[in-house]
Image (cartoon, rainbow, N blue to C red):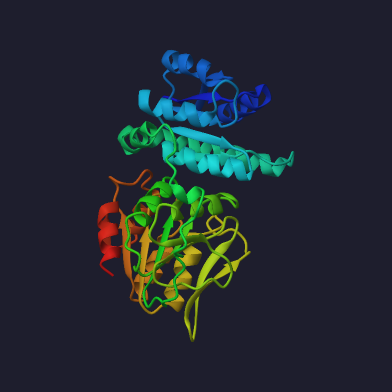
Amino acid sequence: MNKIKVLVVDDSAVMRKTLTDILNGSSKIEVVGTALDPYIAVNKIKQLNPDVLTLDIEMPRMDGLTFLRKLMLANPMPVIMVSAFTDKGALQTIQALEYGAVDFILKPRSDDSAEWDRFASELREKVITAASIQSDRFTARSREKAIEVEEKFSADVILPKTVSKVRTTHSDVIIALGASTGGTEVIAKILGSLHENVPAIAIVQHMPEKFTEAFANRVNNNSKLYVKEAQNGDRLYRGTALIAPGNRHMLVRSDASGYYVEINDGPPVNRHKPSVDVLFRSVAQNVSKSVGILCTGMGADGAEGLGEILQAGGMTIAQDEVSSVVFGMPREAIKRGAAQKVMNIEQMIAYINSL
């Protein structure tokens, strides 16, 4: 079996060596080269033909985002962003996912050995998953995003519209949506294509804290819905989409006035926090009319919960393989008989708009 060939691009010599040692610690991976900036990386890509690229964002001469856009136009390939745990790093990472990066990983914030062990395990897993992604799964969207070299702003950045998107009509139907690897693009496309009065949507996207807020704000700017990172007690009104905050679980609860979300700081479930299974189970237990949608992602988080929504009388949908970046979570749900329907993204949009 051929090893996965990786090129590490980072301006820090220490980080290049660290990433190389971590990845070479897997029998399935070989770091075939390193580069300290994008200009060197271009030549290394031509020489070495790597299967996966790890890419730092902050680099001299050309930043990682600019390089990523150029790369996706010239030579689309699986790229994993290596990101800093900062507000700026969060926004840049969300942009990188839009430009075609398949995933990202956060640099450890301390010298704690347990944190570095988790980082090493997660990085190897993400590289192996990225290498398995067929090029046509990300090439089209990568090229489409990369062509937009300069970000387009509206007058909203100077003078926001006075019309508020905040909703007040209670939602009788609750849509619960879960995703992981590849999910940010799916969620952005779905929420950007819905009319303003669809049922409330509760969303879990596997993502760290800070990153979920940046993601929610970015999606909100391109959606007719009111999209925000959820806070404890937020109401689920029609035309609203609440995204679970990173490093917190989100549950749907009900009272005499309707539905709201509870933010929970319990332990990780299925190694994830937030967990899709936690959201789905709460919907199965507390919502009388529900729709569960499980989208792209590796692993099995959400498969069990989707089955619980089905058993409780809700509609359940899994994303199809062709439109999934990683077909792990939807496949597991389908295998368990938890999905009543299998849909692509356009079919999901049409279905939600019909509710």
Expressed as whole percent of the image width and height from the top left, the position of residue 80 reads 49, 35
Is residue 154 among the parts visible in the rendering?
yes
Q: Which of 195 and 287 is in front in this view?
A: 195
Expressed as whole percent of the image width and height from the top left, the position of residue 287 reads 42, 77
Residue 329 in the figure: left or right of residue 242 = left
Q: Which residue is drawn at 59% across and 58% down?
A: 268
Q: How many marks?
A: 0
Relative vertical location of residue 255 with respect to residue 1 in this rendering, above or below: below
**Farthest right residue?**
111
Relative vertical location of residue 198 with respect to residue 188 in this rendering, above or below: below
Q: Which of 33 and 82 is in front in this view?
A: 82
Snapshot quadrant of residue 173: bottom left
Residue 234 in the figure: left or right of residue 69 = right
Is residue 298 among the parts visible in the rendering?
no
Q: Which residue is drawn at 42% across and 49% down?
A: 183
Expressed as whole percent of the image width and height from the top left, the position of residue 195 reads 32, 62
The quadrant of the image that shows the N terminus is top left
Snapshot quadrant of residue 11: top right
Q: Which residue is drawn at 34% across and 38% down?
A: 141
Q: Residue at x 37, y 35 (%)?
A: 142
Q: Which of 347 and 268 is in front in this view?
A: 347
The quadrant of the image that shows the C terminus is bottom left
Relative vertical location of residue 113 with respect to residue 353 in this rendering, above or below: above
Expressed as whole percent of the image width and height from the top left, the position of residue 60 reads 60, 22
Residue 253 in the figure: left or right of residue 352 = right
**Farthest bottom residue?**
256
